[in-house]
Amino acid sequence: MAKFLITGSKGQVGYCLVQQLTGKADILAVDRDELDITDKDQVYQTVQEFQPDIIINAAAHTAVDKAESEIELSEAINVYGPQYLAEAANKIGATILHISTDYVFNGEGSQAYKETDETGPQGVYGKTKLAGEIAVQQANPRSVILRTAWVFGEHGHNFVKTMLRLGKERDTLGIVGDQFGGPTYAGDIAAALIKIANEILKGRNDVFGVYHFTGQPYVSWFEFAQAIFTQAESKKLLEKRPHLNSIATTDYPTPAKRPANSRLDLSKIKQTFAIEPSDWQKALENIKAYSM
């Protein structure tokens, strides 16, 4: 039975990874309470003792606005932590799968970004995530970077849960309508990572590198909110859906700049692993689970 070390096990994707791997692999699932990935000695010791075949790093500092002022913390979690995990994995010949983000791009234009496109992060979060990608790949040639975007799921904090909460509190909501991307169900990200891991465990050594994985179709946050409330209304989670106004990014200033274009091109992951885009519309059909 293959051995998996999963970091960030209480986050959206980490939680799904544990659920999907339980009974199918020997798992060591750790969150910040069990393993501080920014502590090099602790990381080395844990990896040396457990001897995983695969490390999946689902830990990250994802508070995009807070990152603008918490620069050292962002660097520790998004750059040095992944680097230590990759180094420790390399020492024992293990593979590391590392989750990254659309924020490594500048978010301009309307074309879906390919893995080979020029990066240009606009804020601390994106800059530290890009530096983390580079650190992982330099530390371990047996590495896979999976960039994703707009993650949501039944567990943890996300846009779907925020909309359901605000929909009960307010009659009218202003939702940004000029940022576009692919909502991505956390369970589908976990399934994609496990499929990639299993291919590597079967002996495929030609698949290391960077991949994009998100949901389709691409929509704006406003259109995503519309879909959320349509499902919530049909499942009778709300007595009355709120009125939604499409607003511009400039109407909703935040400390960190958001990408206007978060579309990622998904052809490489489909060609290499036959992994299809996340079906976010199908995932929303289980909307009752998001309101628990």
Image (spheres, rainbow, N blue to C red):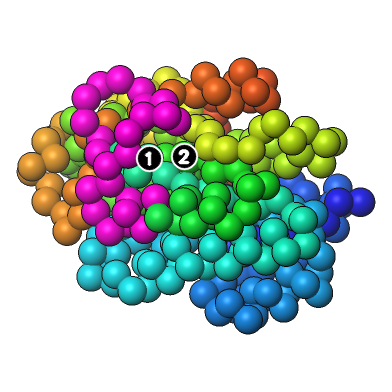
User: Which residues, given as a range, are shown in magenta?
Assistant: 106-130
The quarter holding residue 32 reads: bottom right
Q: Nearer the viewer, residue 252 or 256?
A: 256
Left/right placement of residue 98 relative to residue 73 reads: right
Identify the residue shown where x is 45% and y is 63%: 79
Upstream in sequence: badge 2 or badge 1: 1
Residue type, numbered disc 2: Thr
Q: Which mark is residue 139?
A: none
Identify the residue shown where x is 67% and y is 25%.
Answer: 273
The crowding category of the residue bearing disc 1, from other C-alpha atoms within 10 Å (few below 14, some 14 to 19, many at least 20), is: many
- Look at the numbered discs 2 and 1 and tell me whether their residues touch, using CB distance below 8 Å: yes
Q: Quadrant of residue 101?
A: top left
Q: Is residue 120 magenta?
A: yes
Please provide percent x and percent y for residue 92: 78, 62
Residue 26's quadrant in the figure? bottom right
Seen from the viewer's position, the closer of residues 47 and 194 is 47
Q: Please say if 27 is above or below 110.
A: below
Q: Kindly state the secondary structure of the residue where label 1 is placed.
A: helix
* Picture residue at 73% right of the left edge, 64% below the top: 91
Q: Which mark is residue 102?
A: 1
Query: At label 1, which amino acid type do we have?
Result: Asp
Q: CA distance from mark 2 to mark 1?
A: 6 Å
Q: Percent position (x, y) of residue 253?
A: 11, 51
Q: Residue furthest right?
A: 1
Q: Residue at x 63, y 81 (%)?
A: 41
Q: Is residue 258 left or right of residue 210?
A: left
Could you tell me residue 180's position as x and y percent? 28, 29
Q: Picture coordinates of residue 122 (x, y %)?
A: 22, 48
The disc label shown at residue 148, or none:
2
